[in-house]
């Protein structure tokens, strides 16, 4: 079991909290999909100051436009593979492309982001005495031989495949987190996030929910990658953000699975999108990519017990919310 020791250098910001109640929170990758929703939630609390650091590889300023110029908000263009000097109380470390087409685009950069980026954020956490949360991934379980997956499973990961830059990168990031915790007493939190969807996903980022919804709206065939019987479990983004904040505020280091245990085959997902968004659309089979995990479903017992958290939004309720956002961004209203 992981123990929680006080940080070696209590942050002046933390000790000053008796006088100054504000909490300064760094969100790396805050211009991305999950990050920007997290920022929205953190900004709702008037005691929070939020600093976003992002290199805009897959994120955009547009996701944060409602906060730019706000006195409690700062946006810094910065790459986490370079050292960063800021004074903060908490770090939500999300920076890392999450979609396979983007993380495979420059795999060496993906590894640097996961390894050097996480090392830098841990060095920062150590210097200022901040608590740091890493958004790890269900990909650490690889193509799992245990189903469903709980946190005690060590995974089945190909170390030399095309996905390895991401999943091995995240595994090293988790290792770094625990070594900084054990060696330097850093307060760490690790979330293992399962597939998450919702408004603001990149429309053409190749992930299955965004692909199917965009295809259904554009009246293009839904591309089910073979065999189509592979499964995923999809969590709506507001549920995910709620879980991340509970994890940060709680006392457990994790790793803790955060995801929706509702499991669907990709064919079932296509059928749902067809029924809800465009009953006329065709479903076709296309070739798959290497090392595609055949099944994935979280055991969330630990999150329920430790965080009193479970998802509240079912896939069939989340898909229409995402459709609305995609129609706006694509400029294709429902009646068209
Ligand atoms: P995203 O691609 O929308 O967001 C990632 C953000 O990080 C982007 O804004 C990007 O510009 C930024 N970024 C990337 N490399 C950077 C670097 N070197 N320096 C600074 N900024 C950088 O992805 P997301 O879906 O919001 O994912 C956020 C986090 O959650 C990631 O760590 C991802 O691995 C994890 N995660 C996501 C999912 C999911 O289904 N979305 C599943 C598991 C884990
Ligand atoms: N680091 C950073 N910001 C800080 C403190 C450290 O980016 O405020 C970086 C630092 O450049 C180093 C990494 O974090 O590359 C690890 O720092 P640590 O102090 O743990 O290790 P060391 O500098 O002794 O290698
Ligand atoms: N997938 C699909 N059609 C698409 C895109 C993806 O059938 O247009 C499948 C893919 O083969 C995988 C699943 O959907 O089995 C989830 O893929 P995604 O890239 O969304 O996420 P990840 O593989 O990282 O879970």
Image (spheres, rainbow, N blue to C red):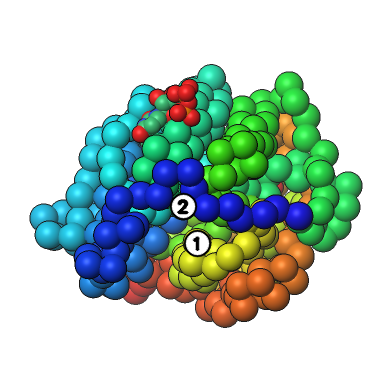
Furthest residue toward right: 145
Camera-nearest residue between 2 and 307: 2
Where does label 1 land, which residue? 248
Q: Residue 329, relative to residue 95: is it above or below? A: below
Q: Judge whether residue 216 can be spotted in this image.
A: no
Tell which of 203 and 236 is nearer to you. 236
Q: Residue at x 81, y 53 (%)?
A: 152
Q: Quadrant of residue 142?
A: top right
Label 2, residues with CA under 10 Å away: few <14, some 14-19, many ≥20: many
Residue at left offset 73%, top offset 31%? 290
Residues 329 and 183: in front is 183
Residue underneath mark 2: 131
**Percent position (x, y) of residue 325?**
36, 65
Q: Is residue 9 visible?
A: yes
> Which of marks 1 and 2 precedes in the sequence?
2
- Whether pointer 2 and pointer 1 mark residues with C-beta atoms closer than 8 Å, the reply is yes
The residue shown at (32%, 32%) is 84
How many tags in the picture?
2
């Amino acid at each position: 079991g992981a123990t929680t020791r006080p940080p070696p250098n209590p942050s002046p910001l933390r000790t000053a909290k008796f006088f100054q109640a504000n909490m300064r929170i760094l969100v790396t990758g805050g211009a991305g999909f999950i990050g920007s929703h997290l920022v929205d939630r953190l900004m709702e609390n008037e005691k929070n100051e939020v600093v976003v650091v992002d290199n805009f590889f897959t994120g955009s300023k547009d996701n944060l436009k409602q906060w730019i110029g706000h006195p409690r908000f700062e946006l810094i263009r910065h790459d986490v593979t370079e050292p960063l000097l800021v004074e903060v109380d908490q770090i939500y470390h999300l920076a890392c492309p999450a979609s396979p087409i983007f993380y495979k685009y420059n795999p060496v950069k993906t590894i640097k982001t996961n390894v050097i980026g996480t090392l830098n954020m841990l060095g920062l956490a150590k210097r200022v005495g901040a608590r740091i949360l890493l958004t790890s991934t269900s990909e650490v379980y690889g193509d799992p031989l245990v189903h469903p997956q709980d946190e005690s499973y060590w995974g089945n990961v190909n170390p030399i495949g095309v996905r390895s830059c991401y999943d091995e990168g995240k595994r090293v990031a988790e290792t770094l987190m625990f070594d900084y915790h054990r060696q330097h007493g850093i307060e760490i939190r690790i979330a293992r996030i399962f597939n998450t969807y919702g408004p603001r996903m990149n429309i053409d980022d190749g992930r299955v929910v965004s692909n199917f919804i965009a295809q259904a709206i554009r009246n293009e065939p839904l591309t089910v990658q073979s065999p189509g019987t592979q499964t995923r479990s999809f969590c709506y983004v507001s549920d995910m953000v709620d879980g991340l904040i509970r994890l940060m505020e709680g006392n457990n280091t994790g790793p803790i699975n955060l995801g929706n245990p509702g499991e669907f085959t990709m064919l079932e997902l296509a059928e749902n999108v067809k029924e809800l968004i465009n009953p006329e659309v065709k479903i076709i089979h296309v070739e798959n990519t290497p090392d595609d995990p055949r099944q994935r479903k979280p055991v969330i017992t630990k999150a329920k017990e430790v965080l009193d958290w479970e998802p509240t939004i079912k896939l069939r309720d989340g898909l229409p919310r995402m459709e609305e956002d995609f129609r706006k961004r694509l400029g294709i209203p429902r009646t068209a």
